[in-house]
Image (tube, helix red, strand yellow):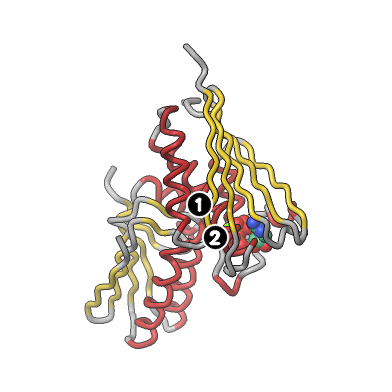
Amino acid sequence: MEHRFEREYGCLIVKMPKELDHHQAEVLKEEADSLILKYPVRSLVFDFSDTCFMDSSGIGVVIGRCKNVRFSGGYVKAVHLNQQIRRIFRLSGLQKIMEVEQEAE
Amino acid sequence: MEQIRNEMKMEFLALSSNEGFARVTVGAFVAELNPTVDELADIKTAVSEAVTNCIIHGYEQKGGSIWIQCSIEGQQVEISVVDTGKGIRDVEQAREPLFTTKPELERSGMGFAFMEAFMDEVEVVSELGKGTCVTMRKIIGKG
Ligand SMILES: Nc1ncnc2c1ncn2[C@@H]1O[C@H](COP(=O)(O)OP(=O)(O)O)[C@@H](O)[C@H]1O
Ligand SMILES: [Mg+2]
């Protein structure tokens, strides 16, 4: 399953793909950036509800979009991380650079 | 209990659409060892990192072939991922966390760090202009 975008006022929600690898990352990056450029994004939410796989290519995607949104004063958070995605966030230090809403165990 | 011994080889084009195919296939191959959900995720992530590196760095997204050889001996899985791309100038430096030669592609430089974190052993043999072979081992069922 691919990613999707939802927009509500100044909030952009990125529904992350089922498998966030380099292949999925490339399209996602481009589409997210063109939305961020086109509409003012005050808060960006990465929603990992449907994501069961993420490798280091996903880290680049998240960090890159964070930079782009924060550049214009926006706020970023990640929600609904499963155990595997949480582990990737912890190992890579992503957890320290953005708000992560923990899923109930 | 009898020792499991098994082996498989695969060859595929260095296309990003094959990243998922490669990790799922290796995951299916090691299934006979009954890995836990975490162990399976570890292996799939490590394979995904090695294969992505062949595509992005080894062949610089211009295409080529990737070989994976995978063997099971008892509880140990050994996976080799091979490309005949550009090779790595300084392997020790390449393995350092956060080191990347392609920051313009938003690479995080965490690929080797993940392979090391998720597998028991990672060996890298590379020669400039010849290619790279990454061999990873993991014991399944350590608990
Ligand atoms: N198969 C390969 N062929 C050539 N260079 C490679 C290969 N794998 C890794 N490298 C080199 O090692 C560096 C670090 O790899 P890695 O830790 O996966 O980080 P990243 O992929 O994010 O750059 C790469 O930037 C690249 O220079
Ligand atoms: Mg890599």
Q: Position of residue A44 (x, y in %)?
A: 34, 72
Q: Amino acid at mark 1?
A: Ser
* Callout 1 secondary element: helix
Quadrant in which ligand 1 is drawn: bottom right
**Can the viewer see residue A17?**
yes
- Cα separation between marks 1 and 2: 12 Å
Crowding at dot 2, Cα within 10 Å, few <14 / some 14-19 / many 20+, comes out as: many
Above or below residue A68? Residue A21 is: above
Asked whether B38 or B18 is in front, the reply is B18
**Can the viewer see residue B109?**
no
Q: Callout 1: residue from which chain?
A: B
* Mark sitting on residue B56: none
Q: Callout 2: residue from which chain?
A: B
Image point (55%, 41%), residue name:
B9
In the image: residue A91, left or right of residue A73? right
Ligand 2 under 8 Å from disc 1 Cβ: no
Asked whether A29 or B50 is in front, the reply is B50
Q: Amino acid at mark 2?
A: Ala
Image point (47%, 45%), residue name:
B44
* Mark sitting on residue B14: 2
Image point (64%, 61%), residue name:
B58
Q: Position of residue B15 (x, y in %)?
A: 50, 62
Asked whether B130 or B36 is in front, the reply is B130
Image point (61%, 40%), residue name:
B136
* Mark sitting on residue B48: 1
Do marks 1 and 2 both belong to one polypeptide chain? Answer: yes
Q: Earlier in the sequence, mark 1 or mark 2?
A: 2
Q: Position of residue A5 (x, y in %)?
A: 28, 72
